[in-house]
């Protein structure tokens, strides 16, 4: 994907000392064995060498054709065949098609279609100096060993700056959150600068309240996670309580960054595929799986007698157990449905104390995945297209004057006699023996 870095930066010690000062692939030339990038763009990454986990080419082409067919008729696919989309997302979206599929799954393509010039206007507008300074200090921390972000003047860091600045202008009441950096960086690795709309959908539809100034939604989900942990992994929950490891010590990094800093990058992409398809439920499943892998056995818990050892165990799970296919199969086997999650959210929301900010979390604003996002956008589009009917004033031309019509004299005559008299046939009305026994034609008007 990228060229190798220059010979003036070949020393491994320099890479470790100041990896953020490396030049981008457009600035440097010349091959170097120390600067080979793997298939995801990470310099010296383990994915540079072929190994297990690489699917056969025929299987990859088959999955690509399925996604091309589904995305070519996206509305029909989401309306009638969402289960197929869900299954294919669990298998993993082909790398060549993530740039096409992610905006469709999260609904960013609809936002961009409705506001085609919004991002460009925000990117060209001057940002708030306070936020610009904070964002500038965090740019070099986002994947410093990725070829897109190694140089301060490279297209990666500059694009990241524009996307994060645009969001602070788009939602000035929320501003910038440091956890948005790795999320936007992963989006930029696969999408053009219009990844801004994907970031908007993640912050406002998938995880509303996560990246605001108070983050009350994160505290709520932390309590929900502990309740689920107590029900599904009671011994792990008891151990965490004994050593004093609360959920806010590890969960914000997991959930806010969508595990971008906690898992191998191939596994991160698989988590994102499922997350954009099925919503926040996937994050809870991934967190529960990591807990089981790190502290699921008695030997593992005995090896972590304190807080530091326990947190270290959560960060040092063997890479073989985090390989994408093996790990994701365990994630999808966690017994946690969307209904279970919503039920626990309601319980913990009722138990949550009054927030100091006075702004309670709004879990009902979170949509559970791509299908709910699609239906919400379809409903909003239908309501927006229904224009109110404008009343029309119809002027009728004046009618021509007609001579007044003379009402026939029917007093004392029957309808039958009237008909025969109009036709000119002199007939006589039939005799009536009794008024109540007269037929319909014999009744008077």
Image (cartoon, rainbow, N blue to C red):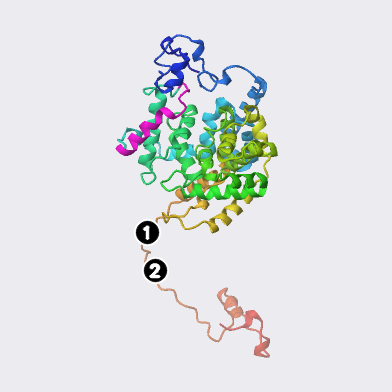
In which quarter of the view is residue 132 placed? top left
- Dot 1: element: loop
Is residue 71 placed above or below 60 in the rendered structure?
below
Residue at left offset 50%, top offset 44%: 207
Residue 273 visible in the picture: no
What span is in magenta? 128-147
Residue at left offset 37%, top offset 24%: 152
Instruction: Indicate yes or no whether the magenta region holds residue 137.
Output: yes
Coordinates of residue 176 in the picture (x, y in percent) = 39, 40
Is residue 290 or residue 77 the one in the foreground?
290
Is residue 342 placed above or below 25 in the rendered structure?
below
Observer-side mark, 1 or 2, equals 1
Is residue 328 placed above or below 378 in the rendered structure?
above
Q: Are marks 1 and 2 in contact (CB under 8 Å)?
A: no
Left or right of 33 on screen, residue 58:
right
Residue 115 visible in the picture: yes
Coordinates of residue 39 in the picture (x, y in percent) = 55, 20
| Residue at the spot of label 2 | 402
Coordinates of residue 81 in the picture (x, y in percent) = 64, 40
- CA neighbours of label 1 inside 10 A, class few (<14), some (14 to 19), many (20+): few
Residue at left offset 43%, top offset 35%: 196
Q: From this viewpoint, which residue is outermost toward the front?
A: 305
User: Residues under labels 1 and 2: Cα distance?
Assistant: 26 Å
| Residue at the spot of label 1 | 393
Instruction: Indicate yes or no whether the magenta region holds residue 42.
Output: no
Is residue 256 or residue 319 the one in the foreground?
319
> Of helix, strand and loop, which mostly describes the magenta segment?
helix
Q: Point out which mark residue 147 bears.
A: none
Is residue 256 or residue 378 the one in the foreground?
256
Coordinates of residue 382 in the picture (x, y in percent) = 49, 48
Please tell me which of labels 1 and 2 falls first in the chain: 1
- CA neighbours of label 2 inside 10 A, class few (<14), some (14 to 19), many (20+): few
């Amino acid at each position: 994907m990228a060229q190798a870095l220059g010979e003036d930066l070949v020393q491994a010690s320099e890479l470790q000392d100041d990896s953020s000062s490396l030049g981008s692939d457009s600035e440097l030339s010349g091959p170097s064995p120390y600067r080979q990038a793997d298939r995801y763009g990470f310099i010296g990454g383990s994915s540079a060498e072929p190994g297990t986990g690489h699917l056969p080419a025929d299987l990859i082409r088959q999955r690509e054709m399925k996604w091309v067919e589904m995305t070519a008729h996206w509305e029909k696919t989401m309306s009638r065949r969402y289960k197929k989309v869900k299954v294919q997302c669990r298998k993993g979206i082909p790398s060549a098609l993530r740039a096409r599929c992610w905006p469709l799954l999260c609904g960013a393509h609809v936002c961009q279609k409705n506001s085609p010039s919004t991002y460009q206007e925000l990117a060209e507008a001057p940002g708030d100096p306070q936020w610009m300074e904070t964002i500038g200090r965090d740019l070099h921390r986002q994947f410093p060993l990725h070829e897109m972000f190694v140089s301060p003047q490279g297209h990666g860091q500059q694009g990241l700056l524009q996307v994060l600045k645009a969001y602070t202008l788009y939602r000035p009441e929320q501003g910038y959150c440091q956890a948005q950096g790795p999320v936007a960086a992963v989006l930029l690795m696969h999408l053009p600068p219009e990844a801004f709309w994907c970031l908007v959908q993640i912050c406002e539809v998938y995880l509303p309240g996560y990246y605001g100034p108070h983050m009350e939604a994160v505290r709520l989900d932390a309590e929900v996670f502990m309740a689920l942990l107590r029900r599904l992994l009671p011994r792990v929950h008891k151990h965490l309580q004994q050593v004093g490891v609360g959920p806010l010590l590890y969960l914000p990094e997991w959930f806010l960054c969508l595990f971008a800093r906690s898992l191998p990058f191939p596994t991160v992409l698989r988590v994102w595929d499922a997350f954009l398809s099925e919503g926040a439920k996937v994050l809870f499943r991934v967190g529960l799986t990591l807990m089981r892998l790190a502290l699921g056995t008695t030997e593992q818990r005995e090896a972590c007698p304190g807080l530091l050892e326990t947190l270290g165990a959560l960060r040092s799970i063997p890479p073989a157990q985090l390989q994408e296919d093996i790990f994701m199969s365990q994630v999808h086997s966690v017994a946690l449905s969307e209904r279970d999650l919503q039920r626990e959210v309601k319980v913990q929301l009722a138990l949550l104390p009054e927030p100091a900010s006075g702004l309670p979390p709004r879990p009902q604003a979170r949509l559970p995945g791509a299908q709910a996002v699609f239906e919400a956008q379809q409903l909003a589009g239908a309501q927006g297209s229904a224009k109110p009917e404008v009343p029309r004033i119809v002027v009728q031309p004046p009618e021509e004057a007609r001579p007044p019509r003379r009402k026939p004299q029917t007093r004392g005559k029957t309808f039958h006699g009237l008909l025969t008299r109009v036709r000119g046939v002199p007939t006589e009305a039939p005799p009536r023996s009794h008024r109540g026994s007269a037929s319909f034609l014999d009744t008077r008007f």
